Image (cartoon, rainbow, N blue to C red):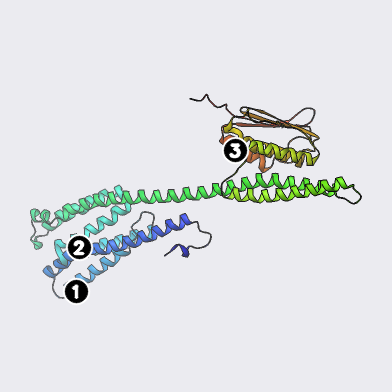
Amino acid sequence: MNADARPPGLSPAYWNASQSQWAAGWRLLVTRGVALAYLLYVVGGIRQDARGAAAVLGYVVLAAFAVTWLVIPVPAVAAPRRFWPLFAVLVALLVLELPLAHASAFVLAVFLTITIVARLGARSAPVVVVLALASLLVPPAIPAWHVSLGAAFGDVTPVAIPVVALGIFAVVRVLRGNSALAEARAELASLAAENERFRIARDLHDLLGHSLTTITVKAGLAARLGAPGQDRARQEQALQEIAEVETLARQALADVRAAVANYRDVTLAGELATGRQLLRAAGIAGDLPRAVDMVDPAHQELFGWVVREGLTNIVRHAHASSCAIRLTASGVEITDDGVGGGALPGTRPGHGLAGLRERVAAAGGVVDAGPLQPRGWRLQVRLAPAGPAR
């Protein structure tokens, strides 16, 4: 089956894991079919020790054992209600084969060993011991079979049973470890995809929220400046604002594409320059720093996000007349004289502030947001200062 057959809505990781399990199931079935070649020893025993109808019955029992062994569910998590009835059938067929194939019938005990060890692992040890002892002690105990204890031991089956048990136990441990690893990888792939979707959603909120707010404010300003009856200077200013709206719209589109591609060129200097235009268009007096040299270069991109989110909230919700931004080597503070909260009174903080907290926490810093007295709001981000260069 190829990747094009993947059902819609199923993640590639889980689809690949399911396909691997499907292929492993077929390989297991083929391997079990090849192992049935060892039943030729039982065929030889039937030919030697049974005649007529007894021989026919021996072959029928052997065929029934082979079919049952192929269909019995081996993995520990597969169809537990089917396993034990089918295992009981295998045991019954082994007992039924004993008078027909004599000691050779204990080859079937090897197949029982494979089945029970694959199912129960180390818990199957008592069953393995019973099967090994039975294959060693039962043939000498039946005089009509004419098998001595030494011959029974030399028949290899009493030794083969524990050896096969140890081999199957080791193989099962490896297979289960590989299965757990495949499931863990599928889960990690799913979590990575979920985190990527969350990142894109957060970035789109931050990018579009700021850009669309700026576009809305500038478009409103252009509408007022270009209203009928305004002088030529105001109309020219309106045309300039519309041109800037077009530029911002194009930049927003580029930002969206960049966010989806996991490349975000956000700089502190660029956000301060854009913020001045935004505040001017909104009629808010802004006291913004002209230089960013005092900020640690490792923090400038994060502080750019802080400035973007803070100014966007001020223009959207604060109804402020002025705001100020203060920068230090490892901190940024944004204050305004509006209604406070970066949102209207009585409303919850938006997704932008939550996303900002996550960004700052990932950088090892803290966000402090709260009202000022008698009015206003402060958004402050503090990071651990960078250590001295070595």
Q: Secondary structure at mark 3?
A: helix
The span from disc 1 to disc 3 (Cα, nearest Å) is 77 Å
Q: Which residue: 61% across, 28% down?
A: 330
Q: Residues within 10 Å of mark 2 (few under 14, many from 20)?
A: few
The percent position of residue 82, horizontal first and vertical second, equals 37, 61
Q: Which residue: 20% across, 71% down?
A: 59
Q: Which residue: 64% across, 50% down?
A: 254
Earlier in the chain: of badge 1 and badge 2, it is 2
Q: Residues within 10 Å of mark 1 (few under 14, many from 20)?
A: some
Which amino acid, mark 1? Val
Q: Residue furthest bottom?
A: 52
Q: Secondary structure at mark 2?
A: helix
Whether 295 is drawn above or below 192: the answer is above
Which amino acid, mark 2? Tyr
The percent position of residue 270, horizontal first and vertical second, equals 66, 39
The span from disc 2 to disc 3 (Cα, nearest Å) is 64 Å
Q: Where residue 56 is drawn, which disc sits there? A: 1
- For mark 2, what is the residue? 38
- For mark 3, what is the residue? 359
Q: Which one is in front, 87 or 368?
A: 368
Quadrant in the picture for residue 52: bottom left
